[in-house]
Amino acid sequence: MLEKLFKLKEHGTTTRTEIIAGITTFLTMSYIIFVNPSLLSTTGMDHDSVFMATCLAAAIGTLVMAFVANYPVGLAPGMGLNAFFAFTIAAPVAAGGFGYTWQEALGAVFVSGVIFFALTITGLRSWIINGIPKSLRAAVGAGIGLFLAFIGLSNPEVGIIKANSATLVSLGDLSSHGALYAILGFFLIVVLDNFKIRGAILLSILIVSVISALAGHTEFKGVISTPPSIEPTFFQLSFEKVLSGSFVQILIALVLVELFDATGVLMSVAKQSGLLDETKVPDAKKRFNRALFSDSTAILSGSLLGTSSVTAYVESTAGVQAGGRTGLTALAIAACFILAIFFSPLANSIPAYATAPALVYIAGLMLRELTEVEWDSPTDSIPAALLVLGIPFTYSIAEGFAFGFISYVALKLGTGKLKDIHPATYIIAILFLVKFALF
């Protein structure tokens, strides 16, 4: 049955190899089941329900990838997208957010999923991706990385960065137990990853949590129990803000990040696994299109369950390196996420200072994207820099995007380089300008 479903012999792999690859990928991306509830619960969402939504959305999205595309790719709520959800869309206006309720934020994710799906099936997804300047695409990852790092370091339980009335921010108390645990967790991740230990982030989260519990700083609530209810977030979407001016800006940001994240990851995994080589995989293009389709449906199911945008995970490359070549790898990943729903007490035992180092570490990885910026061209590098700086300094991915795209078009027009501007970039810049002018 497995041979018929996933064509293992054709891909030169075995059931054992595929399952090991799936477990490997799960270990490298499983930190999300602890980090995502921690972030989204700051909006007032029920922690246990978000935990369930995270596991189930990841499992459903990955199962679709397994059976529709036969790709060794894991999906889960995306880092950066969850931060945008919690700290921009559903954050109070006084805190620099849009002031949406978390139900309205879920509605925005659903609508972005519909748009993303439409772009995929019409082929416009590729048109937009090819039309965004290389430097701006690279800047998106780096800017979101800085945003994640700022969120992690400024978390009240961590306190490495704190508010300051004179300088806006300043160094916090590094002698506090929260800061010390966060620093320990960060160095644990780097050291473990340096030695190529699978699940370095997950291990760091668990080690810090155990030490914290033993020291009496947190309460250990157990490991396994009956899965909690998903009812508090299930089908709780609200579309009351669909016609508001800020909704357009949120949608642009969500769709663009979803486009860049998912497409880039799928391309990377497909290349590493040889699935784009038409000499070895006759239906390579058809399967890649199916992978794009599978990825685009995951956002819709995630929003209905009660979590931020679901996307393909770059950690899937770990499974590819372990020999994963087919959807059986994805099936194994999905099975692991389903089993994870029984570990909700463990998720409730994880303090914020155990997950914060993951945000900072991932930020460091995302900053590598800056090497792709065309620094020798000011009309490319300056908009990229404005995008990168605009995201953390305005505490908004959407505002950073606006800085980058508007300045890119303005500088290219001002220097007579009209041929460098793709229609997709024009459209995005104009939409952001309209938002600033009218709302």
Image (cartoon, rainbow, N blue to C red):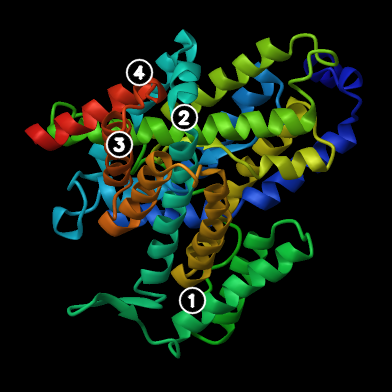
The residue depicted at 55 percent of the width and 60 percent of the height is 364
Q: Which residue is tagged 1?
A: 219
Q: Residue furthest front?
A: 416
Which of the two discs, 2 and 4, sits closer to the camera?
4
- Label 2 CA crowd tier, 10 Å (few <14, some 14–19, many 20+): many
Which of the two discs, 3 and 4, sits closer to the camera?
3
Q: Which residue is tagged 3?
A: 411
Mark 3–mark 2 distance (CA, rounded to whole Å): 25 Å
Mark 2–mark 4 distance (CA, rounded to whole Å): 17 Å
The residue depicted at 74 percent of the width and 45 percent of the height is 318
The amino acid beneath tag 4 is Pro
Q: Is residue 290 above or below residue 201?
A: above
Indicate left or right for 404 with 434 as reference.
Answer: right
Q: Check if mark 2's residue and mark 1's residue have beta carbons within 8 Å.
A: no
The amino acid beneath tag 3 is Leu
Secondary element under disc 3, as helix, strand or loop, is: helix
Which of the two discs, 3 and 2, sits closer to the camera?
3
Q: Of the numbered discs in the image, which one, if any, rests on residue 423? A: 4
Q: Which residue is tagged 2?
A: 259
Mark 2–mark 1 distance (CA, rounded to whole Å): 40 Å
- Of the two numbered discs 2 and 1 on the same chain, state the one appearing first in sequence: 1
Residue sitting nearer the eye, 300 or 292? 292
Q: Residue furthest bottom?
A: 175
- Of the two numbered discs 2 and 4 on the same chain, state the one appearing first in sequence: 2
Indicate left or right for 412 with 3 as reference.
Answer: left
Q: Is residue 246 above or below residue 430?
A: below
Percent from the top left, x then y, of residue 197?
77, 61
Secondary element under disc 1, as helix, strand or loop, is: loop
- Of the two numbered discs 3 and 2 on the same chain, state the one appearing first in sequence: 2
The amino acid beneath tag 1 is Glu
